[in-house]
């Protein structure tokens, strides 16, 4: 059965159900059963494979009680990202490659209804007065919505799919992102309460890596997670508090920022604070928390390299405290952040750990030049002879630089030389 015929049966079946069935009197199971009967009547003698029949029934049922076409896309585990550019253009990322779907929403109104349902599920709102919102699906998938008139092509919705199985260090080793030896080093860093920043570009796997790293947090600690949209999957910790920011309502009231949540978390007796992503002025509060006895904090940030992460942190701190001298900011960063792990998405779409770097200290400048933060690269990614233009081959290799700031490791009882 062709795609056009499938969509016609979906539309005809949905129309028949809406016009002839008492929807408000039917349970979900009854509606699903009726939907299957009606779809089979509309198919008639036309040949339809079982999997296509299931897909049609799901689409019809979802368009009435669920999220319509979106339900079908989200249920496909091989799809990692969904990009909806207006009701006619849907793009997906599958196996690391972008492709356009040959399906579309019935009309713009239908897409807008689905967006309102998605946003409403997380207790948020989006409208012309507040046309941009970050939210999430019930499974934790990250959702960004932009409505007209800001979006010129119609409603835009971007969904970063949420893995049903939490990422673990073992999986990162299997994927070749890190080695078993490096995993053991990272475990020691986390348990010894090193403050760790994970940097990388969009789609490089920062949140995924943070999820995996969080599994090393001792299970008896009190952990507070702070995110724009809750998506971290920290398992096995009973004393866990998850906080999520909130946008202002249509009247411009009720906004709760990441910065507000970090300040509030300091009064909750945290042993560790995990911030999903630092984007702005909250960087200052995060650094101050790290500097005032809240060691072992973990966070992520957008950057193109380890050095770039430091520059970005400086810029973000200035957003929160414009008058702060650059020297004071760099001193704060150097004393707060212990380790930066940089990730990247390479030319073959694979995600690799590119560097693990120690933040050593702040080195004061002189009259003619500003002071700088001294970095010490412990591990760096090196491509090998098997690399081609289409495929990247290589591994994270140990440099000859020893770990300089080993005080926390010794305090935790580790005498291993790194």
Image (cartoon, rainbow, N blue to C red):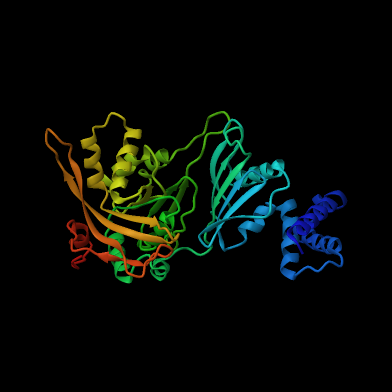
Up the image or down, 388 lies above or below 258; here it is below
Q: Residue at x 79, y 52 (%)?
A: 11
Image x and y of residue 412, in percent: 23, 62
Of 288 and 150, nearer the camera is: 150
Q: Is residue 82 above or below residue 414?
A: above
Q: Tell me the quarter of the image containing the C terminus.
A: bottom left
Residue drawn where x is 38% and y is 61% of the image: 352
* Residue 348 x, y percent position in the rendering: 44, 61
Q: Which quadrant is the N terminus positioned in?
A: bottom right
Residue 389 position in % (x across, y down): 41, 62
Q: Nearer the viewer, residue 34 or 76?
A: 76
Residue located at (45% from left, 62% from top) = 235
Q: Is residue 368 left or right of residue 101?
A: left
**Rendering quarter of residue 285:** top left
For residue 292, say whether it is visible. Answer: no
Give the left or right position of residue 222, taking residue 323 as reference.
Answer: right
Q: Quadrant of residue 349?
A: bottom left
Q: Quadrant of residue 130?
A: top right
């Amino acid at each position: 059965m062709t795609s056009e015929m499938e969509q016609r049966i979906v539309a005809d079946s949905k129309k028949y159900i809406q016009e002839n069935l008492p929807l408000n009197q039917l349970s979900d199971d009854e509606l699903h059963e009726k939907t299957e009967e009606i779809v089979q009547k509309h198919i008639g003698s036309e040949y339809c494979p079982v999997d296509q029949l299931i897909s049609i029934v799901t689409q019809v049922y979802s368009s009435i009680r669920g999220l319509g076409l979106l339900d079908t896309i989200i249920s496909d585990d091989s799809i990692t990202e969904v990009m909806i550019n207006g009701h006619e253009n849907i793009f997906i990322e599958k196996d690391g490659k972008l492709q356009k779907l040959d399906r579309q929403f019935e009309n713009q109104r239908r897409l807008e209804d689905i967006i309102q349902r998605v946003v409403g599920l997380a207790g948020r709102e989006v409208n012309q007065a507040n046309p941009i919102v970050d939210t999430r699906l019930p499974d934790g998938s990250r959702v960004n919505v932009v409505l007209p008139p800001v979006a010129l092509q119609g409603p835009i919705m971007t969904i970063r799919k949420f893995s049903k199985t939490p990422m673990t260090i073992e999986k990162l080793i299997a994927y070749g992102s890190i080695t078993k030896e490096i995993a053991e080093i990272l475990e020691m860093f986390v348990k010894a309460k090193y403050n760790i920043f994970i940097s990388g570009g969009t789609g490089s796997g920062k949140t995924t890596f943070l999820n995996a790293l969080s599994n090393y947090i001792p299970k008896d600690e009190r952990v507070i997670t702070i995110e724009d949209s809750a998506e971290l999957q920290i398992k096995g910790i009973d004393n866990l508090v998850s906080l999520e920011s909130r946008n202002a309502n249509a009247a411009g009231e009720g906004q709760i920022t990441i910065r507000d949540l970090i300040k509030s978390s300091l009064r909750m007796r945290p042993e560790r604070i995990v911030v999903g992503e630092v984007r702005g002025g909250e960087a200052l509060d995060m650094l101050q928390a790290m500097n005032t006895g809240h060691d072992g904090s973990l966070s992520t940030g957008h950057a193109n390299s380890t050095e770039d992460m430091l520059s970005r942190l400086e810029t973000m701190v200035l957003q929160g405290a414009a008058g702060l001298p650059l020297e004071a900011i760099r001193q704060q960063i150097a004393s707060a952040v212990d380790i930066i792990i940089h990730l990247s998405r390479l030319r073959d779409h694979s995600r690799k750990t590119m560097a693990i770097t120690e933040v050593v200290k702040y080195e004061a400048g002189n009259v003619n030049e500003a002071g700088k933060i001294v970095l010490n690269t412990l591990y760096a990614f090196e491509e090998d002879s098997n690399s081609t233009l289409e495929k990247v081959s290589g591994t994270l290799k140990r440099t000859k630089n020893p770990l300089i700031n080993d005080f926390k490791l010794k305090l935790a009882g580790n005498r291993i030389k790194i």
